[in-house]
């Protein structure tokens, strides 16, 4: 039975792959004969898949017994079903209610290993993504998925030590590195996928009644799941959650004082994402939210510190200066202390990103702390470049530019040479590294922000930088065009190639393929010219002829609207 199950699953997967190959051949046939052959192949593969799909009910009936018997064939069958759900979801249409019920039951079966429960869930999650409207026709689909996924999100292991010591790329990432946490981590991600696929339909109504039960649960894993779920659904379900915002904030406040670091992290995670979606938090509830996040920045757990700092950034981005100023001294002192403690890179990234936002919002109110922060930020940046911590380096560049622009000429000019000269030297000596690490654009953005407070002396640095920008603006990205019969639905594209499809005279599509790396370089060059021109003001006059010559030739550039827009801005700056 297991062998037959595996064979049918493999045949379904092979049929799906063959149909995809026929689709690819049909997009760009060599000639009319090849086009007809590809059409015939696709039709044949669809028929084969439909025929094999008739065996799905029997396959699903055999699957439960095979899973109970154990072995790898059943796991492979589930994984194959997920592939078929992605590539030939129509085959599930006649048996969709049975598939949803069967896979959801398997996903909560204590007799199965976590890998098989995850594989069963993946089948239904994939169907929700590929056939959302059809899935919503299954009675209670959203409620069943929310309930099933929440039951898996509470399966975190008891030991938080490995989690607390991990260094994730982002403070808002839960980074479920322990084997015991894989199922819970998958379920949280799956909840996000399902909510997005269903566009929130029925999700909040199913989730809200369960949040209270989880929040009052005896196990900390239940409170963690409730808070993570709030963060995962708040973007898509914002309208449905708005009337319950005060209750959600109360849930967050309770979690923020929990003894378990993972619950405190989840509270800051949820609050940060809620702050991004609801301006009411910054306008009406900042007196509750900011103290919670401030306490989190001082938490003993590095993971909580990072999530709290990023939460402050999200909240501050929606606050007016007048509302933020009463908290400024505490926030700046807390973030300075965080950086002074030489934390891991992901914590330093969170602190630098938040400082950048605070400097922008507080404006010249940060001038008194300029001398406290700028030497530290420069030192951190040098260390990040040496450690190849490029994401951190980008955040530090943003903070350096924001601090100088906010503090103004009086604070920055005595220190300008020490800040600008090393950055320009880095730009000239290590341009290939900056390109490869995506630091070139943040570096130019930083220098452009330094230009205004530095004033006229910045002109001699721009004279050195300008040739590199003109070279970048003059790059001619490789562009290929051809006519294809159909536009692909699967989004498969080559790396570093952007593909666009334009209806072609009522017959097929004009396919335009552009080298994205070269186009990004061109965009960076033209956009940076505008940023520097805007910052330099009258100091831009000596550079007008060369910049106008470059920009005027790009006003009619047909392969990217941003090139045309930035070129027009440069022309306006020149005038």
Image: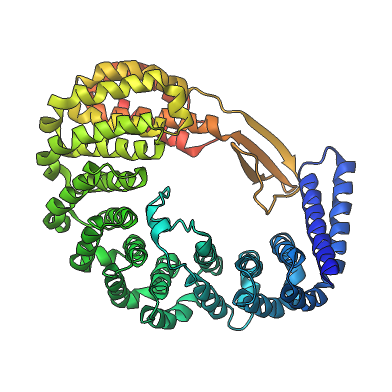
Residue 423 appears in which quarter of the rendering?
Answer: top left
Q: Position of residue 59 (x, y in %)?
A: 80, 73
Q: Position of residue 30 (x, y in %)?
A: 83, 37
Judge whether 481 appears above or below 552 on screen: below
Q: Quadrant of the N terminus?
A: bottom right
Residue 395 appears in which quarter of the rendering?
Answer: top left
Q: How many marks?
A: 0
Q: Is residue 95 visible?
A: yes
What colour scheme governs how the chains and residues are painted in the rendered image of this protein?
Answer: rainbow
Q: Nearer the viewer, residue 426 or 257?
A: 257
Q: Nearer the viewer, residue 382 or 523?
A: 382
Q: Residue at x 14, y 38 (%)?
A: 372
Q: Quadrant of the C terminus?
A: top left
Q: Is residue 558 visible?
A: no
Q: Residue at x 46, y 33 (%)?
A: 563
Q: Position of residue 493 (x, y in %)?
A: 65, 43
Q: Nearer the viewer, residue 508 or 506?
A: 508
Q: Nearer the viewer, residue 379 or 115?
A: 115
Left or right of 14? Residue 284 is left
Q: Residue at x 70, y 49 (%)?
A: 487
Left or right of 543? Residue 169 is right
Judge whether 429 appears above or below 518 on screen: above
Residue 256 appears in which quarter of the rendering?
Answer: bottom left
Left or right of 445? Residue 341 is left
Q: Position of residue 99 (x, y in %)?
A: 70, 76
């Amino acid at each position: 039975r297991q062998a037959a199950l595996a064979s049918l699953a493999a045949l379904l997967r092979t049929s799906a792959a063959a149909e995809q190959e026929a689709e690819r051949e049909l997009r760009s046939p060599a000639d009319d004969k090849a086009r007809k052959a590809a059409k015939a192949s696709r039709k044949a593969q669809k028929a084969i898949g439909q025929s094999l799909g008739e065996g799905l009910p029997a396959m699903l009936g055999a699957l439960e017994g095979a899973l109970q018997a154990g072995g790898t064939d059943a796991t492979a069958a589930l994984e194959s079903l997920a592939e078929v759900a992605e590539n030939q979801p129509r085959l599930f249409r006649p048996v969709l209610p049975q598939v949803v019920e069967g896979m959801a039951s398997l996903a909560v079966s204590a007799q199965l290993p976590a890998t098989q429960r995850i594989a069963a869930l993946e089948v239904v999650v994939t169907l929700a993504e590929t056939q959302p409207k059809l899935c919503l026709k299954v009675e209670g689909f959203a409620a069943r998925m929310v309930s099933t996924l929440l039951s898996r999100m509470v399966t975190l292991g008891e030991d938080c030590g490995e989690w607390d010591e991990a260094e994730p790329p982002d403070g808002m990432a839960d980074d479920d590195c322990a084997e015991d946490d894989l199922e819970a981590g998958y379920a949280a991600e799956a909840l996000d996928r399902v909510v997005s696929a269903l566009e929130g339909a029925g999700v909040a109504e199913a989730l809200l009644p369960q949040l209270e039960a989880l929040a009052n649960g005896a196990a900390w894993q239940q409170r963690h799941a409730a808070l993570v779920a709030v963060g995962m659904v708040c973007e898509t379900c914002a309208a449905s959650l708005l009337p319950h915002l005060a209750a959600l904030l109360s849930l967050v406040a309770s979690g923020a004082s929990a003894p378990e670091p993972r619950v405190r992290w989840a509270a800051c995670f949820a609050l940060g994402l809620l702050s991004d979606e609801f301006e009411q938090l910054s306008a009406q509830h900042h007196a509750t939210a900011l103290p919670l996040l401030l306490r989190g920045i001082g938490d003993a757990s590095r993971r909580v510190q990072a999530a709290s700092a990023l939460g402050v950034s999200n909240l501050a981005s929606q606050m007016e200066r007048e509302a933020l100023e009463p908290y400024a001294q505490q926030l700046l002192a807390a973030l300075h202390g965080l950086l002074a403690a030489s934390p891991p890179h992901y914590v330093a990234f969170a602190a630098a990103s938040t400082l950048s936002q605070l400097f922008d919002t507080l404006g010249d109110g940060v001038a008194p702390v300029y001398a406290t922060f700028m030497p530290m930020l420069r030192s951190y940046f040098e260390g990040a470049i040496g450690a190849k911590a490029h994401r951190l380096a980008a955040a530090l560049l943003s903070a350096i530019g924001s601090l100088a622009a906010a503090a103004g000429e009086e604070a920055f000019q005595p220190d300008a040479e020490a800040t600008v000269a090393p950055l320009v030297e880095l730009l000239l000596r290590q341009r290939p590294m900056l390109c490869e690490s995506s630091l070139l654009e943040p570096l130019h953005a930083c220098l452009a922000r330094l230009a205004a407070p530095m004033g006229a002396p910045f002109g001699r640095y721009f004279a050195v930088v300008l040739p590199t920008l003109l070279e970048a603006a003059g790059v001619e990205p490789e562009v290929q065009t051809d006519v294809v019969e159909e536009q692909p639905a699967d989004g498969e594209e080559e790396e570093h190639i952007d593909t666009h499809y334009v209806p072609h005279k009522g017959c097929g599509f004009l396919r335009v393929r552009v080298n994205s790396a070269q186009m990004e370089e061109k965009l960076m060059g033209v956009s940076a010219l505008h940023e520097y021109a805007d910052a330099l003001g009258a100091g831009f006059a000596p550079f007008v002829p060369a910049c106008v010559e470059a920009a005027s030739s790009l006003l009619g550039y047909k392969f990217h609207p941003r090139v045309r827009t930035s070129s027009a801005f440069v022309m306006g700056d020149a005038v």
